[in-house]
Image (tube, grey):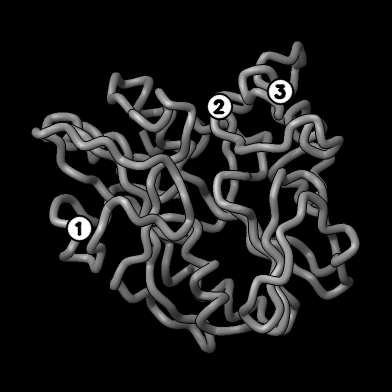
Amino acid sequence: MQNPAAVSSLNSSNPARDARLAIRSGEHNTHTGGVAPGHVQANMVILPKEYAQEFQTYCMLNPKPCPLLAVGDAGDPSLPTLGEDIDVRTDLSGYRVFENGKEIEVASDITSYWRDDLVSFPLGCSLSFEEALVQHGVPLYHRQRNGRPATYVTNIDTAAAGRFNGKMVVSMRAMSAADAIRAIQITTRFPNVHGAPVHIGDPEAIGIEDLDYQQFGGTPPQMRPYDVPVFWACGITPQIVVETVKPSFCITHLAGRMLVTDLLNTDLAIL
């Protein structure tokens, strides 16, 4: 298993492309947290063209969980506005493949599934605002354990668009009250990567009965007596939507395994 830090330290003028090549070759086959620091990473949804307009509208109506970074052309696995030589069929270290809303495979390469009618939707990822939080001295305990934030399905309805609807998924970070206030101030500047939290405090108020149960994995939370849970909208939300709507075919990223882009996190910040 490749250490993310090893990928990050490659000597190149384009560490994001180096990371993609390492993933493409199978050298890096785990989560992408800590890979190519400073670069935007993207969640991914890939759908047949017949669903594309509805899903794009769904994203526009739900910018918190589904902040669109780009829209691919049908049948084209490249995303030139996001980076040099991107191939969405090979450049994520994990994919989930769905048919009629049911997962049929977890794969590290989706070339065999690619079709001329598939459209790629890269979505902003919380790793971008996490970098800003760390830079401003807000501790993130899952990173200290080389893990991912805890994620949960909530009772929060997303805005429907045509056939697309479903509950919001959130990621949670435990913080002191003072750090939570700072986190709100910092992440508000990043609306293209989920922005400010959607909820703070009582998990049951948004339908989370047990913080230790996480449908999509992540590092179990370690709450100090004075911590509060802070919840951000999460780019895994479309995977719940796919299970609800049951499109004939869909591919998403595997949780924590993102597309590393050439964009810089600072490019997305609102000053």
Work out whether 233 lies above or below 258: below
Q: Mark 3 points at which residue?
A: 15
Kind of residue indicated by mark 1: Pro
Q: Where is residue 258 in the image (x, y as percent from the top left)?
A: 62, 45
The 10 Å Cα crowd at callout 1, few under 14, some 14 to 19, many 20 or more, is some
Q: Which mark is residue 211?
A: none
Query: Where is residue 168, by image quadrant?
Result: bottom left
Query: Where is residue 34, by image quadrant?
Result: top right
Q: Name the residue under label 1.
A: 203
**Image label count:** 3
Q: Where is residue 147 in the image (x, y as percent from the top left)?
A: 47, 34
The 10 Å Cα crowd at callout 3, few under 14, some 14 to 19, many 20 or more, is many
The 10 Å Cα crowd at callout 2, few under 14, some 14 to 19, many 20 or more, is some
Q: Please tell me whether mark 2 or mark 1 is closer to you in this view.
A: 1
Q: Name the residue under label 2.
A: 34
For marks 2 and 1 on the same chain, the one whose residue lies earlier in the sequence: 2
Q: Is mark 3 on a helix, strand or loop?
A: helix
For marks 2 and 3 on the same chain, the one whose residue lies earlier in the sequence: 3
Kind of residue indicated by mark 3: Pro
Q: Are marks 2 and 3 in contact (CB under 8 Å)?
A: no
CA gap, disc 2 and disc 3: 12 Å
Q: Please tell me whether mark 2 or mark 3 is closer to you in this view.
A: 2
Using residue 150 as the reference point, say whether residue 9 is left or right of it.
right
Say which residue appears at 43% left-offset and 82% top-offset.
160
